[in-house]
Image: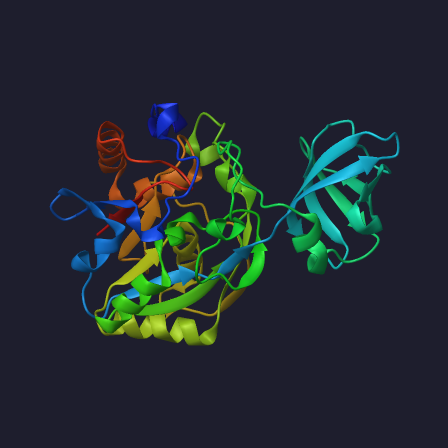
């Protein structure tokens, strides 16, 4: 399968640069896989497409403010983007310069020191701090917005979902950004159920596939968790004939990583599951998702769920109808 099959042209003005004033005011493109019908709606009206007993599976990860600025020994400044905490003191990072090699020392605000202890591919490095930085990131760090967002975010909480709890992501699970507490309470009132899982999103999620063939791509790993309570709730929903609706590709990846012939099992650890057309879904019945970058693994996952031709048709119609794309953009509901 050629990577080029997942390419499309998006006018730059359709890349959403800021969130809407009200989260659930975003548009919602609804695709019915049985009929092939496309319906245009608003996220605030999602209830009309749901059934009593539907189980929405949400990702409760929280984005850490991992964009840091440091000073080199020579006095120059360098940007450091935290990607993943490896231990109490060590982090995998991106640094703004390939000349930052092993042994280089960096000074961060509040007299925090860091030393490059390993060089990875490209601009990735392993840095070791002289003290844990988790508790001071709110003071020394900024929210790490995706590279296609050029405007500064006025309220950092708008890049968090309302159900975010566990700090650990370098990027937001963007399908969840459309939910408000008001909308959630309204859905619960009408018999919609919720289950919480966790997947800590890595920045590699935005990287396009560069291999000519999809099958040759080595996908990044991300840490995920489903506890016993959530697994039992999901399995019971399947036994009862209720639909399991994954909110976001992160929830899809987590659910499918935890699935076997007997259902969903509790898991905690890294997943390297790569979902692309030809994959057989074991758990997910429906999906809420945003519009993703061309040639990305996320678009391939969505194409596996709804069919590549259907995905391209929906994207083409969304572009023609001037939907907003990517992290702060509009949403899709795939039934």
Whether residue 17 is situated above or below residue 88 in the rendered picture: above
Residue located 49% across and 34% down the image: 149
Colouring scheme applied when the structure was drawn: rainbow
Q: Quadrant of residue 257?
A: bottom left
Using the image as rendered, state which of residue 193 and residue 303 is in the foreground: 193
Residue located 39% across and 54% down the image: 176
Apparent side of residue 114 relative to residue 248 in the rendered image (left or right): right
Q: The N terminus appears in which quarter of the rendering?
A: top left
Q: Quadrant of residue 307?
A: top left
Q: Is residue 151 visible?
A: yes
Q: Is residue 262 visible?
A: no
Residue located 52% across and 47% down the image: 171
Residue located 88% across and 34% down the image: 73
The x and y percentages for residue 158 are 47, 50
Apparent side of residue 112 relative to residue 138 in the rendered image (left or right): right
Using the image as rendered, state which of residue 52 and residue 302 is in the foreground: 52
Apparent side of residue 111 relative to residue 183 in the rendered image (left or right): right
Give the total of numbered labels.
Answer: 0
Whether residue 263 is situated above or below residue 303 in the rendered picture: below
Using the image as rendered, state which of residue 86 and residue 142 is in the foreground: 142
Whether residue 273 is situated above or below residue 298 in the rendered picture: below
The x and y percentages for residue 304 are 32, 43
The x and y percentages for residue 238 are 27, 69
Using the image as rendered, state which of residue 165 and residue 244 is in the foreground: 165
Q: Quadrant of residue 212?
A: top left
The x and y percentages for residue 254 are 44, 57
């Amino acid at each position: 399968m050629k990577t080029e099959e997942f390419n499309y042209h998006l006018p730059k003005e359709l890349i959403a640069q800021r969130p809407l004033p009200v989260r659930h005011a975003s548009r919602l493109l609804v695709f019915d896989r049985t009929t092939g019908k496309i319906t245009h709606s608003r996220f605030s009206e999602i209830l009309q497409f749901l059934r009593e007993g539907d189980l929405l599976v949400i990702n409760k990860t929280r984005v850490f403010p991992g964009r840091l600025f440091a000073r080199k020994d020579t006095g120059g400044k360098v940007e450091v983007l935290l990607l993943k905490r490896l231990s109490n003191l060590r982090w995998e990072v991106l640094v703004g310069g390939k000349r930052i090699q092993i042994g280089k020392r960096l000074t961060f605000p509040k007299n925090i020191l860091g030393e490059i202890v390993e060089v990875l591919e490209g601009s990735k490095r392993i840095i070791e701090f002289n003290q844990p930085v988790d508790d001071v990131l709110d003071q020394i760090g900024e929210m790490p917005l995706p590279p296609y967002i050029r405007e500064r975010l006025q309220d950092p909480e708008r890049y968090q979902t309302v159900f975010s709890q566990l700090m650990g992501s370098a990027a937001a699970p963007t399908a969840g950004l459309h939910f408000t507490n008001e909308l959630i309470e309204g859905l619960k009132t009408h018999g919609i159920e919720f289950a919480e899982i966790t997947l800590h999103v890595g920045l590699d999620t935005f990287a396009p596939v560069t291999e000519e063939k999809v099958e040759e791509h080595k996908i990044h790993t991300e840490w995920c968790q489903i506890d016993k309570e959530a697994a039992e709730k999901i399995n019971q929903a399947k036994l009862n004939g209720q639909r399991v609706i994954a909110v976001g590709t992160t929830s899809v990846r987590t659910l499918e990583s935890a699935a076997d012939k007997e259902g969903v099992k509790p898991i905690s650890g890294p997943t390297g599951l790569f979902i692309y057309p030809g994959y057989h879904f074991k758990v997910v019945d429906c999906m809420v998702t945003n519009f993703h970058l061309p040639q990305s693994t996320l678009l391939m996952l969505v194409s596996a769920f709804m069919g590549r031709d259907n995905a391209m048709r929906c994207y083409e119609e969304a572009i023609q109808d001037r939907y907003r794309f990517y992290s702060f953009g509009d949403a899709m509901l795939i039934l």
